[in-house]
Amino acid sequence: MKSATTASATAPGDVTSFSLGLALPLGVVFAIFFVLPLAQLFYLSLHNDTAATVWGLGQYIKFLSDPFSLAVLGSTLLLGAEVTLACLVLGYPIAWLYQRSGSRVQTLIIMIVLLPLLTSVVVRTFAWIVILGRQGIINSVLQSLGLIGTPLRMIYTQGGLIAALAQVQMPLMVLPLITAIGRIDPNLADASASLGAGSWRTFVKVMLPLSMPGIIAGCTLTYAAAITAFITQSLIGGGQMLFMPMYLYQQASTLQNWPFAAAISIIFLFAVLAIVALFSMLGRRARGYGDAR
Amino acid sequence: MASVSEAKSLVLDRITHRFASGTMAVSDINLDVKGGEIIALLGPSGCGKTTLLRIIAGFIGQSEGRVIIGNDVVDALPPNRRAVGIVFQNYALFPHLSISENVGYGLAARGVDKATRNKEAQRLLDMVQLGPFGERLPRQLSGGQQQRVALARALAIKPSILLLDEPFAALDKNLRLDMQIEVKRLQRMAGTTTLIVTHDQEEALSMADRVAVLSHGHLEQFGTPSEIYDQPQTLFVNTFVGTANRVTGTVIATDADDVKVALDAGGEIIARAPKPVRASDKVIVCLRPEHLTFVSDDSGFAGEIGMALPLGATVVHEIKAKDGSSIKISQARTGGTPLREAGTPVRVAPLAPGLATVFPQ
Ligand SMILES: Nc1ncnc2c1ncn2[C@@H]1O[C@H](COP(=O)(O)OP(=O)(O)OP(=O)(O)O)[C@@H](O)[C@H]1O
Ligand SMILES: [Mg+2]
């Protein structure tokens, strides 16, 4: 009896020290492959010349005073917002449907949602080129039905890009939503109805606030993925539309201007962090955050 | 507050429900509840109590039959237009809303302005003795307090029917008794027709004006607590409500409702027969432990003491009868009640003829 008490008294301490020890390898990997390069990037960005010999904030000033660079940043952040909105609007009903379905339909939905993750980004993107192209599936169907004369221009447009990105990022939105909606006690909707609320009121007052954790997680993931989706952005967006990842790539790889590329990365990083912080602040504002267990 | 005269009646007319999976959850239930009554739905787990409540509330559309509230058949009405208040077994309070917003939710849905809503919520919270807790979130309250909030929330819409699904199951014994008294008091005050689902027979017998006993989706008996306890109509009711010794016997004579039975354990007794039986039928005889007594004449049947259990206010003796069946007899414990030794030969008989009940085998 006595030894059991002693064991249980010391157990929590042991668990903590073990878990810290276990985290060490990951911590080391993280430090070497993430923190160090980031520090190096930051160091590089603080130089005014391409050879990185003269210290200064020149690169940041250059970016922030250049309308072209700011426009690229702006359109990238806007693209992220549009894709996120599209994913949310299309993904919420899917997640909702998932929770209302029998187990067989659920498996099917999960399969369809996860399918994009099982194919390579390049393949998926080329599929979208096939769909959206001048002689693509949509255009040829519409033309053969006689609904349009000349092919619609969909590829290399903002709309086409949003559609492609939304499809590619959909799992990142739907999976957290499914989890969050699944945690909501089904009796709550019934309780709301029995108190006289119609289905719209029940949705707005009960379901939506309680799915907020999932909405925030989904939006954050989708947003981050959409604005950094280099391949899809470049292939579907084409030459006319320039977004931050491509801009960065051009500066670093084509123009060999590493300090400017580094400054772009740092600015991009902070812009994204600010947006993510905004998301979670909004979420905490909308009550229900952290309550829906 | 609705006065008793406005209380609406509730009629369940041949309600049958089959789930898509094929489960027959309730079958051919007829209940006729008067305005202002408290009815207990009593039955073992899985007998269809919750399903019946959900049909009345409108969450499930029954396969057959009609639900009539007041003078209206409500089958076509969605839950939000039935004015049926429901307290869920797990309370189902909105976790993201404060207690006062929870209570005011139904009023908000009816377009009542915020000031009136808050005042009414406060009045209801005072009524369930939770006045100071309006600003808290549900998870900051204990189970019993949440239960009272759920009750206040359901009462806030002045429902014509109040449904409570095992409302006290999660509470400890003392709190449960308090809440039973509280609910009964609130129900009397509001005069709301109320259905309480429970599988606790004491709760059913103590709280309800009438009790509906369900088994496997069938209504076994619907009557006052004393009818249920004293004149059970089926073997199930007799054994599910209260305790009953079951012994076997053969009918030797019948006379209107009373029959004379020869017990397999030896001896003859007079018993009540709610279902018709004929002479020489094999029957099951139910004898409640508190309806038996030790006798010194040659009435009843013989056996020997198996075990004596002093249970506080009562003493229970287990008796081994001649045919091997085991019979319990309980007596109120007075100063002089002796505990009998194991192996003592005794004779046992019902306190009065007709206290035993027979059912066809
Ligand atoms: N959604 C459903 N789909 C299929 N069968 C169901 C469903 N809900 C309940 N059942 C079945 O219907 C029967 C009655 O269930 P119900 O929940 O009404 O029982 P209950 O009397 O409330 O039991 P408990 O006391 O355990 O709450 C059970 O056999 C149950 O398995
Ligand atoms: Mg139930």
Image: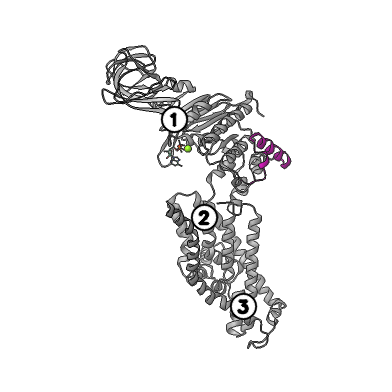
Residue tagged 3: A247
The dominant secondary structure in magenta is helix
Q: Nearer the viewer, mark 2 or mark 3?
A: 2
Is the residue marked 1 within 8 Å of ligand 1, measured from its CB?
yes
The amino acid sitting under disc 3 is Tyr
Between marks 1 and 3, how big is the CA–CA gap?
Answer: 73 Å
- Which is nearer the eye, B252 or A76? B252
Mark 1 secondary-structure assignment: strand
- Label 1 with label 3: CB-CB less than 8 Å: no
Q: Over which residues does the magenta segment extend?
A: B112-137
- Which is nearer the eye, B295 or A190? B295
The amino acid sitting under disc 1 is Leu
Residue tagged 1: B214
- Which is nearer the eye, B70 or B312? B312
Between marks 1 and 2, how big is the CA–CA gap?
Answer: 37 Å
Q: Position of residue B121 (x, y in %)?
A: 67, 38
Asked if residue B82 shows in the view, the reply is no
Mark 2 secondary-structure assignment: helix
Residue tagged 2: A179
Q: Report the chain holding disc 1.
A: B
